[in-house]
Image (cartoon, rainbow, N blue to C red):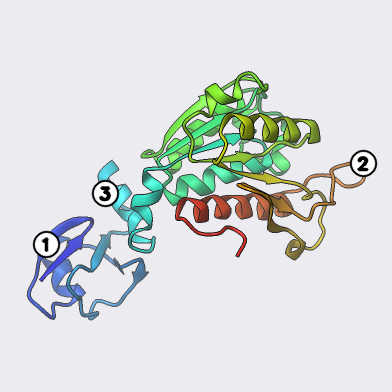
Amino acid sequence: MQIHINERPVHLPDGATVALARDRTKPDADILIVNGFPVPADHILAAEDRLTLIRRGEIPSADELEALLVARHTPGVHAKVRSAAVGIAGVGGLGSSVALALARTGVGRLVIADFDVVEPSNLNRQQYFVDQIGEPKVTALAHTLARVNPAVEVIAHHVRLTPENIAGLFGEVDVMVEAFDDARQKAMLAEAFRLARPGVALVASSGLAGFGAGNAVRTRAAGRDLFVVGDGTSAAQVGNGLMAPRVGIAAHHQANAVLRLLLGEDPVQ
């Protein structure tokens, strides 16, 4: 029978165990994953199974790293996300977290845009580090994403977004993420993008400030190809700031909505 070991086709006898496959191809592997789930060495393989063999602490090659990412996904998922491009407007608390989640998921191309630099006040909720203070956010984030998943292509634009440049910057993305703090910027992005790319889904946000219940943050449809994440009411203001836990919940709602859209699923249901 044929199976795939670390994404390469291998022929084994019918009824072969994971232990046999490991001993023939990577005897020092101590993490064994079949079709996205860890298994014991005596697990019996079936034709067309995808087996991934990992040795703890080993730094893999670029090709091996991608195979290891594939291993933890449901079969068939990675091919779809690997060929996709996602735009992210604003890479603060929401955008930087969305970008990291999508990079870990294996999205092939991320187009990120933001005019700002990393400030000390950003560190309470944004995916940056003290030694990145003063760097353009898109530059700092691109470096972090490369450390997480070098297979992801990151196109970084250090620019203020306007109605005039949105079509040019995000003209080829499959899904768009709005990740601004300011309500006027949110409205501008939504209007300009939907005019420029009709039919391409936009995942926006509204209402995620403070430390209210996480279960109040949800994804809802707000029109054709428009989805909004948040509770719809919790605006950032004096006495109700933006904090990492709730911003993180909303960002991962957005990232999950993007993933479902790329896989042809309804992000709300």
Task: Name the residue located 40 percent from the left edge and 41 percent from the top edge.
Answer: 108
Check the image and report above or below for 137 versus 22.
above
Q: CA distance from mark 3 to mark 1?
A: 16 Å
Q: Amino acid at mark 2?
A: Val
Location of mark 1 (residue): 10
Lower position in the chain sequence, tag 1 or tag 2: 1
Residue 248: x %, y % from top left: 66, 51
Residue 213: in sight, yes or no? yes
Residue 195: x %, y % from top left: 63, 31
Q: Amino acid at mark 1?
A: Val
> Are the two marked residues, 3 and 2, in contact with CB atoms closer than 8 angstroms?
no
Q: Left or right of 139: which side holds 10?
A: left
Residue lying farthest to the right in this orientation: 238
Q: Left or right of 81: which side holds 90?
A: right
Location of mark 3 (residue): 64
Q: Amino acid at mark 3?
A: Glu
Neighbourhood count class around disc 2 (C-alpha, 10 Å): few under 14, some 14–19, many 20 upward? few
Residue 67: x %, y % from top left: 29, 52
Front position in the image: 134 or 107: 107
Lower position in the chain sequence, tag 3 or tag 1: 1
Check the image and report above or below for 253 versus 239.
below
Q: CA distance from mark 1 to mark 2?
A: 61 Å
Q: Residue 238 has which mark?
A: 2
